[in-house]
Image (tube, rainbow, N blue to C red):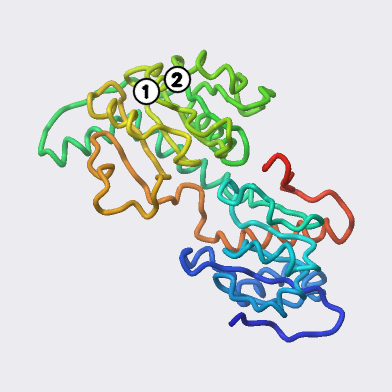
Amino acid sequence: MPKSSPARGGKLRLHLENSRKKPHEKEYTLERFALAARKHRALAKQLEVSVGYDGDISDAELQKVDFMLGVPPNRARLKSGAPRLRWLHCTMAGIDSLLPLDWLPAKTIFTNNVGVHGAKAREYVRMAVTLLHTRLPQMLSNQRAHKWQQIFTPALAGRTALVIGIGDVGGGAARAARDLGLNVIGVRKSGKPSPLADRVVRLSQLDRVLPLADFVILAAPNTDETNGLLDARRIGLLKPQCGIVNISRAALIDHAAMCVRLRDGSLSGAVLDVMQHEPLPAASPYWDVPNLIVTPHISCDDSDYAALTLERWFANLERLLAHRQMQNRIDPKRGY
């Protein structure tokens, strides 16, 4: 059953919802909440906090909840069973797995975790682009095959990175590319310029810029427009020496088509941090694809993930109680 801090009259109820399938770094406990609350004592004094796992909060307790951090698996309960719920904060940046938002109570503010991931994304992409340029995926494949082959590459600076999605994660990717001296072409639905890119094009213009890329970095959410975005035809537009990095959603890319080109050497390498089935099954063929490096969905997550999330949550609580515009609000009609 959920654990609670001592109840006091007149306080606002916050429920911290967890999943036992998530790693410890993403667990929201009373102890972690108390550490975060030290920086926000005045706000914390207004709260009564409960902690639960996998939707185990009782119906009676759910009716008392004003704020919830984390989305329970049985979220349909919220629409009729949480009459006081003013604000629901999703502890992920991508909410495609929660769409459509027809389960969300009509007057509930819904926010996501955009802003927590950019710094780690920057570090990961800097690493991934460097090793792709060095052709490390091919060298690792050669090592497993006991094959000695010297591979020489030119200087990295001056190459072109195509960053698809220039939000928090994509912004981190663009900064990483600039750290390495790369030219950055950004792709976003609106085509709105970004100070992080030398050039930004609309998503509808993607085919024009794919042949220019030395590195394609996928950092966009999974939406109707981006699902299957990098399909077999578009992968065929890439240079043979191009490398692919995916730190967003597996559904954005045709893995089978990409692997064909990795196997025949017409694509130099790929680093994938997201897969269609996670954890990746032991029998998956992706473990053994040459020139491919798979990391276990860690690219954008800090070891202090829960603390970073709670810090941003308190900042948004202050805005809410002061009747100011909150950050990361999701429009239920648009789904982002």
Q: Horizontal placement of 229 versus 316: left or right? A: left
Q: Alpha-carbon neighbours of circle 2 within 10 Å: few (<14), some, or many (≥20)?
A: many
Whole-percent x and y of residue 165? 58, 32
> Given contact means CB atoms under 8 Å apart, are the residues at marks 1 and 2 in contact?
yes
Q: Which secondary structure, mark 2?
A: loop
Q: Is residue 59 above or below residue 22?
A: below
Q: Residue lying at the far right in this picture: please name it.
A: 323
Q: Quadrant of the N terminus?
A: bottom right
Which residue was labeled with disc 2? 213
Q: Which secondary structure, mark 1?
A: loop
Q: Is residue 109 above or below residue 234?
A: below
Q: Amino acid at mark 1?
A: Cys
| Residue 49 falls in image quadrant | bottom right
Which residue was labeled with disc 1? 242
Q: Residue at x 54, y 29 (%)?
A: 164
Nearer the observer, 78 or 283 = 78
Q: Alpha-carbon neighbours of circle 1 within 10 Å: few (<14), some, or many (≥20)?
A: many
Q: Residue at x 68, y 25 (%)?
A: 190
Q: Earlier in the sequence, mark 1 or mark 2?
A: 2
Q: Residue at x 33, y 28 (%)?
A: 257
Q: Is residue 121 above or below residue 65?
A: above
Whole-percent x and y of residue 323? 89, 55
Nearer the observer, 290 or 203 = 203
Whole-percent x and y of residue 162? 50, 24
